[in-house]
Image (spheres, grey):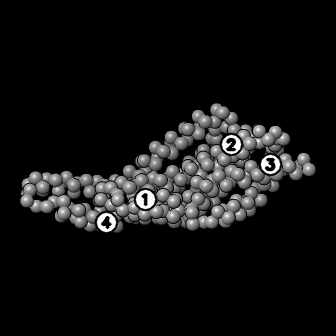
């Protein structure tokens, strides 16, 4: 009976780490996927990982207080791995926000069914492109593989208080990269709209009798969408490279795990 209880602890901890990752990782955290399906997938993946992880020589505890701490640690690790990928999708949404504000579409927002947040239409468009690229590059497999690798390099029961410094270092790097990627994606359109705004301002001073606001608003929208069509292949390429670098970053994080 004691053997069964100890083995169940390992099984439960594996499932907790997977479930925590599913809560924040792109595609897995989608509200379109029913919660029961997520639970079944986490359970089945745990069944696959359990024989391998349990053979690594873990020594569970019979202390319930310590076991509760272990569960908390597993939740933190799962959320951390999923969040590293979620940040890159936030960069694509942020790029859409930059774009929408410049052309006056900032007020036109929709509910993203994947992230369950309100984002501009352009951000939704970029987010869907990024999700398709993510699935085409087998990103969901990469996340599951990262969870498995984390048990080799960040075993359950071994997270220490000093790990917070390593976590913060990786999070700061991910957040800084988010703003850089968003700026790269939005810069061509934002720069053109900025030049158009300056030109309209000069024209308003030269011809005060013209209603520049009424003329400039549809003109900026037409130019912005024309530029969006032109730079979409470049945006897709930037997204592709960004997702690839995110996968490499996750691999680096797992190999340099802050234990």
Name the residue that disc number 3 marks.
Answer: 9
> Can residue 11 be seen in this snapshot?
yes
Disc 1 marks which residue? 119
Q: The residue tagged with tag 2: helix, strand or loop?
A: helix
Q: Disc 4 designates what residue? A: 225
Marks 2 and 4: which is nearer the front?
2
Q: CA distance from mark 2 to mark 3?
A: 14 Å
Q: Earlier in the sequence, mark 2 or mark 4?
A: 2
**x, y (%) of residue 121?**
40, 63
Q: Are the residues tagged 1 and 3 within 8 Å (C-beta)?
A: no
What is the total number of numbered labels drawn onto the structure image?
Answer: 4
Secondary structure of the residue carrying tag 4 is: helix
Most foreground residue, 226 or 14 = 14
Q: State whether residue 166 is above or below residue 99.
A: above
Observer-nearest of 90 and 243: 90
Nearest to the eye among marks 1 and 4: give it: 1
- Residue corresponding to mark 2: 73
Label 2 Cα crowd, 10 Å radius (few <14 / some 14-19 / many 20+): many
Disc 4 packing (10 Å; few <14; some 14–19; many ≥20): few
């Amino acid at each position: 009976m004691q053997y069964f209880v100890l083995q169940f602890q390992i099984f439960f901890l594996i499932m907790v780490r997977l479930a925590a990752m599913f809560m924040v990782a792109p595609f897995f955290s989608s509200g379109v996927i029913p919660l029961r399906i997520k639970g079944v997938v986490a359970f089945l993946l745990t069944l696959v990982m359990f024989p391998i992880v349990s053979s690594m020589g873990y020594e569970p505890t019979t202390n319930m207080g310590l076991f509760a701490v272990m569960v908390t640690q597993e939740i933190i690790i799962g959320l951390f791995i999923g969040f590293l990928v979620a940040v890159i999708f936030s960069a694509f949404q942020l790029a859409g926000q930059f774009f929408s504000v410049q052309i006056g579409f900032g007020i036109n927002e929709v509910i993203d069914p994947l992230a369950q947040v309100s984002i501009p239409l352009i951000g939704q468009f970029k987010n869907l492109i990024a999700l398709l690229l993510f699935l085409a590059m087998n990103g969901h497999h990469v996340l599951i593989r990262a969870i498995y690798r984390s048990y080799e390099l960040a075993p359950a029961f071994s997270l220490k208080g000093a790990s917070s410094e390593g976590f913060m270092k990786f999070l700061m790097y991910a957040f800084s990269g988010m703003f850089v990627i968003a700026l790269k994606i939005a810069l061509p359109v934002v720069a053109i709209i900025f030049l158009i705004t300056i030109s309209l301002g000069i024209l308003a001073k030269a011809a005060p009798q013209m209603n520049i606001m009424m003329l400039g608003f549809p003109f900026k929208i037409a130019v912005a969408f024309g530029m969006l069509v032109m730079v979409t292949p470049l945006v897709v390429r930037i997204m592709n490279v960004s997702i690839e670098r995110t996968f490499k970053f996750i691999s680096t994080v797992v190999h340099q795990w802050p234990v």
